[in-house]
Amino acid sequence: MRTNNPLPSVGDDPHPELGGGPLSQAGGRGLPRGDGPGGPDPGAPLPPMSGTGEVQEGSLPDPDTVLAAVGTGVWRWDEAAGTVTLDAEAARLVGLPAHAVTVASANIRSRFHPVDWNELDSISRLAITEGTVAEARLRIVDEHGREIRVVRARCKPLVDPRNDSYEMTGTLQEVTGASAGAAALSEVTGDWRRSREAFLLDAGRALAEARSTAEVLRVAAGLSMPGFSPDGLAVFGSEGDRLVLVGHQGHDPSDVGPFTEMPLDSDYPAAEVIRTGHAVYLSSPREYAERYPAAWPMVERFARRSWAFLPLTAGGGTMGAWLAAFAYPVRFTPDERSVLTTVARMLGQALSRASAAETEKELTQGLQRSMMPDLGPRVPGLGVAGRYVPTGGGLEVGGDWYDVITLPSDRIALVIGDVQGHDVRAAGLMGQLRIALRAYAAEGHPPDAVLTRANRFMAGIAEFGATGATRGQDGRDGDERFATCLYVEADPATGMLEIARAGHLDPAVQMADGTVLMRPTAGGLPLGIDPDCDYPTTRIVLEPGETMLVCTDGLVETGGHDLSTGWARIKATLEEFGSENLEVLADALIGAVYGPGSHHTTGPLTDRRDDDIGLMLLRRTSVPESGRAARRATLAIAQTEPERIAEARLQLRELLHDWPDGEQVESAELLVSELLSNVLRHTDGDARLVAEVTGRPGHRYMRVEVADSSDDLPHKRRPGELASSGRGLLLIEYLADSWGVAPRGQGKSIWFELGEPEPGADRGDRTDRGDRTDRGDRTDRGD
C-alpha cells in the first residue's frame, strides 16, 4: 500500500499519551523488552511517590516498565520489507515464544482470525488515509483455528518521505472477559458489508463513466450510501487564495451565497481540509460550534445535525473538499468513515479527469476553430459550404483542414488537405502549412507553383520538427510527417477550375440533372515527401447548376469502407440531396457517414477506420438561359499524358450512365479515343475535350468536340486492306449521326453528335439527326 497524505514521519512519537519518546526508545529496532537482554525487570518496584500521591520530580517510570507492568506489547510492521517486529510481550500475545522477534508478515497473519485480519487491514488503510490512530479487537487462534485470546490493537502509520513507504507501529493488549471476536463486537453486520461493497462498486462505475464536471456532480448527488445517506452535498475548490463553491445539492441556491467564495485561510471546515489535507468529522451541532465558532452562524440555519468534510485528492495533492451533511446524528464509525473516504477518493479522481478533459476540449476546440476559415464574402455566381468533424481520436483536433482564399482578379481558391496524424503536432503542422498556402496564393502564383512551394516548405518543417526523434531501421526520423492537399483556383465568370493535387482524393462533380461523376486529375506526391516533386494542373469547367465536392479520406473510408464502396455511399447521398442548398447537402453528407443512421451503411471492412472528416462544396449558381439542364464535361490532355485518354473514356461513360443504347456509348468511346489519339500524334499541342448532353429524356443528343492548336484540316483517306492507319474519319462517318470540322481563331475542333434513339425505334434504323437543329458550326466534313 502507498499513500500520498501528509502523515507523521518515522521517528515521531506514536503514543504521546505514554509519555515516551520515539519507537526506538521503546526497545530500538529489536524492541528488547521483558525477557530480552537489557530489558527492565517487570517485577522491579516503581519509583517512590510523594506524600501527596504524585510521582517525585525526576523519578517518572520508564515507559518500558509501565508497558510491561500492564501487559502491553509493542509491535512494528514494515510494509516495504514485509516483516513484523514484536517485543517479548507482543510475541507472547500472538502465540509466539515470549522474546523479541522479527518474523514475516504472513506468519503473523496466520495467527489472527481471517475475518479479524480483514477488519484490521480495512481500519489500517483508513488510518493511513486520515493520518489517525487505528483500533480493533482481534482474535488470536492456534494452528487448528481455535481461539486463544482476544487482543486490543492500536496502531498508527509512520510514513518515510524518502521513498513513500510506511510502517505501522502500535501496541497489543489482552482483553479479558471477551467471548467473541472483533467482528461480533462490531455493530457492522455481514449484510451491511455486502451492501457497502456493492455501493462502492456502483459508485466507482458511475463516476468513471462521467465525462464532465456537471455529470460528476449529478452522480455524486444521486449516491445513496448504505445505512446513512447525506441530504446535503457540496464540492469546494480553490482558486489562488480563495475557496470557491464548485457545485452543491440539497441547498437552496439563495442560501449558499456566503459560501460561493471566501478566503482560504477562513475558519471554515472546507478551507481547513484543503489547507491540511485531513478530513474533518463533526458529529453534532455543539461540536461544530465549538470548533468553528466563526462559521457556525452561517451553517446553523440549514438545520443539519452532522457533517463530514473530506479532501478531494488527485495527483498527490489536494484539489478540493467534499461536504456531506446529514439531517440526523452520525457517529462516523470507522466503517462509515471508510465509505466516505473511499467515495471522496473516487470523486476527486473523477473531478480531476473531468476538469482535465474539459480544459483539453476547450483548448482543442478553440485551436480548431481558429484554424477553420470563415468562408468569407459571397462571390457572385458561386456558392461555398464546408464542414469539419473530428472523429478519429480522443483529441478533438487533427490534421484535416479546408480554406477559402480570395485571389486577385475576382478569383477564389479552395484548399483542402490532411496532415498525417491525429495529435497536437499534426494540428500544429496543419496551421503552419495553411498559413504558407495562403501566403503563396496571395502572391498570385498559379496552382502548380503554390503546391510546389508548399511542398518544399512542408519538407523543411517536417525535417526540422523530427530532429532528435528516434530513427527507424531505415534511418529515417520516426516523426516525419506528410500532407495531402487539393488546390482549386476558380473563375466565377467562366466556371473554369484549375486544379493541382498532391496525393489527395480526386474531386466529384454533380451535374445540374443530378448525375455524379468522378473527375480524375493529374497530381503528384503528398507534400513533404520529395522536395523536388512537380504538380501538374488539370482544367475543368463547372457548368451552371453543377456542384463540385472535395473531401478528405475520412468522408470516404469512415465506417469500414474502401474507396469503391465509400464513393458509392457518397454518390447515393449526392443524388438524394443534390437539389438542396449547400448547407443542407453538407449536413446530409456528414450524417450519412457519421450520423445516427450511418451504422446502416457500414462497409465491408471489419476495421471501421473512423477518421477526421473535412469537406467542401462549390456550386456554380448561375442558371442557363434556356432553363434546361445540360451535362457537360471538359478535359485537357497534354502531349506528355497519352495515358489520360483512358480517363477521357471513363468520363464519357459516366456522363452517359443513363443513355439507353449501350452500343452508342461504346461508339462514342471509340470515337473519343480516335480523335484524341490523332491530336497527340499529328500535332504539337494539347488536346481539349468537351462532351455535352442536352435535351429532354427520350429526345436527347450528345455532342463531343476535340480541339487542338493546329490549323491543318483533316482529310478522309482510302486506306488499303493492310494499312495501319487512315480510318479515323471513316469511323466517325459510319458511327456518328453527324460530324464536322470547325476552324477556330487558332487551331480547329472536330465534333460529332449521336442522338438518343426514340422509344421503340430499331437500332439499325440510323438517320441523320444532325439536321434537327441548327448548331451554327457545321463545316465541310473533309470529303
Image (tube, rainbow, N blue to C red):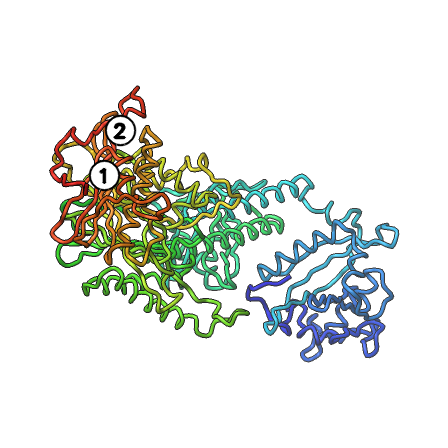
Query: Residue 15 location in percent, x, y?
Result: 66, 67
Q: Residue 43 vs residue 269: left or right?
A: right
Query: Would residue 369 be seen by someone viewing this image from the given angle?
Result: no
User: In the rendered image, which quarter is residue 758 located in?
Assistant: top left
Query: Would residue 481 be seen by someone viewing this image from the given angle?
Result: yes
Q: Which residue is mark 1?
A: 752
Quadrant of the snapshot with the N terminus: bottom right
Q: What kind of element bears circle 2?
A: loop
Query: Residue 21 location in percent, x, y?
Result: 66, 75
Pick the residue in front: 50 or 655.
Answer: 655
Q: Residue 542 vs residue 427: left or right?
A: left
Q: Residue 59 vs residue 308: left or right?
A: right
Pick the residue in front: 175 or 99.
Answer: 99
**Residue visible at 49% across and 45% down?**
608
Query: Residue 90 location in percent, x, y?
Result: 79, 64
The kind of residue tagged 2 is Glu
Vertical position of residue 228 compared to residue 84: above or below: above
**Residue visible at 61% across and 61% down?**
128
The kind of residue tagged 1 is Phe
Quadrant of the snapshot with the C terminus: top left
Around disc 1, counting alpha carbons within 10 Å, would you say few (fewer than 14), some (14 to 19), or many (20 or more)?
A: many
Q: What kind of element bears circle 1?
A: strand
Q: Which residue is mark 2?
A: 756
Vertical position of residue 563 compared to residue 173: above or below: above
Pick the residue in front: 574 or 597.
Answer: 574
The residue mark sitting in front, 1 or 2, is: 1
